[in-house]
């Protein structure tokens, strides 16, 4: 019923493609030269889509579930040099200490894990570097002794997260928006992360032990956030960190308590376009129709005013009025000092953008279309969805969580971590990340560890990347063309 109403409201609307390109910092450096023009992988979109990650680097195998030592997840991420991390084991990896990724040019290919895949629990994983690709991984922290994120850190630039699942933290499920620069006088200066994409991810069930069960803080300079699901977090779904261009479209929000999207400052140019909002049993009545709340947090600009927001084509389940016109009650500004200086309507007129702000384009859908796509494909779907995501997605579809009102305090409230079974990995004689059978199928040598870094069809992706992307290393395809830049993993 809700989608029929949504389609009626949206039937005269075309999905707006953002046609303005970000002018800042779209040249990336890798191994001393400009990166090829291909996306990070087929289906990579937005501001972070041009990073090469670990392309052409060494292959590092995760062969055990240990916290540290040879063959561990930690050893692979803490290694130096361009690298591609593949998994020869599936299961639950428990981190007893914070894991910091400080060396750049890394691709973490969670889709290679056998069996049920991999889940990271325990301590926080930090991205403290640049040029990072992370795909098909789960970060379900569940650490109750110290408040922190499941995935966070001080990311610099050129980062894309794709098809990952985040949950069960005491601060924010995933927080990526700034890094610390050491100044000549020895002081620390916060700087915005540059060129970040988070796409097709799930952020759910932040832990509400200390009133800080938040989805995430995302942002920086040039951020693209599309086709993600926020479910059963009290607020920050997400919060906008720092200023500059923040593009948020085709996402699904379900069962927030008191906040949907908020944040920003005077330097913010925010697009909130064609997202799907579905309040749940935990959602307070006053914010069931809330699309966003601009703020002036003085994170990047000291000016005591909010930034500019373009808000359009968002659909709110149960509220046809706000769905038809998102500014008719869907955007609020609740800073008392601003409310008393001209009234809310005056503030919102200053905040409101008449046209979309510059952003790297994505393959945009209407809000109801995005709802169906996100429920079908978001999160760590490879090698298979785990019971946690399956339960969350069923709750979103039904509009009713399976545990209370959906806001939980510990993982035990929903049964804890499921069992992640491993399975025998495919034979890989030369340990180049490509299975022997696949190499033989495409005319490669399963005894040559160097042929993974070659590009036999000259399309910009190495042979190993062709395997990771499930594409044909003998067939030249122009992946810079939008019609070819689609996810090839199923």
Image: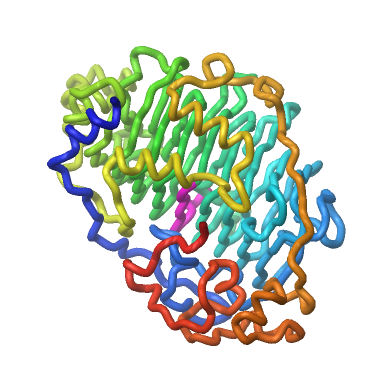
Q: Which of 464 and 334 is in front in this view?
A: 464
Q: Which of 267 and 87 is in front in this view?
A: 87
Q: Toward which corner of the image does residue 148 lie, by quadrant?
A: top right
Give the percent coordinates (x, y) of residue 311: 24, 38
What secondary structure do most residues of the magenta stretch adopt? strand
In the rendered structure, the answer to whether residue 441 lies left or right of residue 199 reads right
Q: Toward which corner of the image does residue 418 lie, by quadrant?
A: top right
Q: Can residue 103 be seen in this view?
A: yes
Answer above or below: position of 177 versus 475.
Answer: above
* Range of residues picked out in magenta: 190-200
Colour treatment of the image: rainbow
Q: Residue furthest right?
A: 69
Give the percent coordinates (x, y) of residue 358: 26, 55
- In reply to whether residue 194 is colored magenta, the answer given is yes
Q: Residue furthest left?
A: 12
In the rendered structure, the answer to whether residue 410 lies left or right of residue 481 reads right
- In reply to whether residue 198 is colored magenta, the answer given is yes
Q: Can residue 300 be seen in this view?
A: no
Give the percent coordinates (x, y) of residue 469: 54, 67
Residue, x 50% and y 26% (percent of image)? Answer: 395
Residue, x 55% and y 64% (percent of image)? Answer: 131
């Amino acid at each position: 019923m809700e989608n029929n109403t949504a389609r009626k409201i949206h039937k005269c609307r075309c999905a707006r493609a953002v046609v303005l390109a970000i002018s800042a910092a779209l040249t990336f450096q890798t191994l001393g030269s400009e990166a090829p023009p291909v996306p990070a992988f087929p289906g990579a979109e937005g501001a972070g889509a041009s990073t090469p990650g670990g392309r052409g680097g060494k292959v590092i195998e995760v062969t055990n579930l240990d916290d540290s030592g040879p063959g561990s997840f930690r050893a692979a991420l803490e290694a130096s040099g361009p690298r591609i991390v593949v998994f020869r084991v599936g299961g639950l990896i428990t981190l007893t200490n914070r894991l910091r990724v400080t060396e750049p040019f890394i691709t973490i290919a969670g889709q290679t894990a056998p069996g049920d895949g991999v889940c990271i629990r325990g301590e926080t994983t930090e991205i403290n570097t640049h040029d990072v690709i992370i795909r098909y991984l789960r970060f379900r922290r569940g650490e109750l002794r110290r408040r922190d994120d499941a995935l966070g850190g001080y990311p610099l630039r050129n980062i894309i997260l794709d098809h990952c699942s985040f949950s069960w933290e005491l601060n924010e499920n995933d927080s990526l928006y700034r890094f610390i620069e050491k100044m000549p006088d020895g002081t620390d200066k916060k700087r915005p992360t540059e060129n970040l994409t988070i796409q097709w991810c799930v952020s759910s069930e932040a832990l509400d032990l200390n009133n800080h069960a938040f989805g995430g803080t995302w942002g920086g300079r040039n951020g693209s956030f599309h086709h993600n699901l926020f479910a059963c977090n009290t607020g920050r779904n997400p919060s906008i960190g720092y200023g500059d261009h923040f593009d948020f479209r085709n996402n699904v929000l379900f069962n927030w308590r008191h906040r949907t999207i908020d944040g920003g400052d005077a330097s913010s140019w925010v697009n909130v376009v064609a997202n799907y909002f579905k309040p749940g049993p935990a959602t307070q009545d006053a914010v069931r129709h809330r699309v966003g709340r601009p703020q002036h947090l003085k994170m990047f600009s000291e000016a005591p005013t909010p930034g500019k927001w373009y808000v359009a084509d968002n659909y709110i389940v149960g509220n046809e009025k706000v769905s038809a016109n998102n500014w008719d009650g869907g955007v609020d500004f609740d800073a008392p000092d601003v409310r008393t200086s001209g009234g809310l309507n005056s503030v919102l007129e200053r905040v409101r953008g008449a046209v979309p702000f510059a952003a790297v384009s994505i393959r945009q859908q209407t809000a109801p279309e995005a709802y169906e796509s996100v429920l079908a494909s978001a999160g760590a779907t490879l090698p298979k969805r785990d019971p946690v995501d399956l339960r969350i997605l069923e709750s979103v579809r039904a509009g009713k969580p399976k545990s209370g009102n959906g806001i939980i305090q510990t993982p035990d409230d929903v049964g804890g971590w499921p069992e992640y079974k491993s399975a025998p990995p495919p034979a890989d004689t030369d340990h180049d990340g490509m299975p022997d059978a696949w190499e033989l199928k495409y005319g490669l040598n399963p005894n040559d560890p160097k042929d993974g870094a070659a590009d036999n069809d000259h399309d910009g992706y190495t042979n190993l990347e062709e395997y990771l992307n499930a594409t044909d290393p003998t067939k030249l395809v122009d992946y810079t063309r939008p019609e070819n830049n689609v996810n090839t993993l199923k």
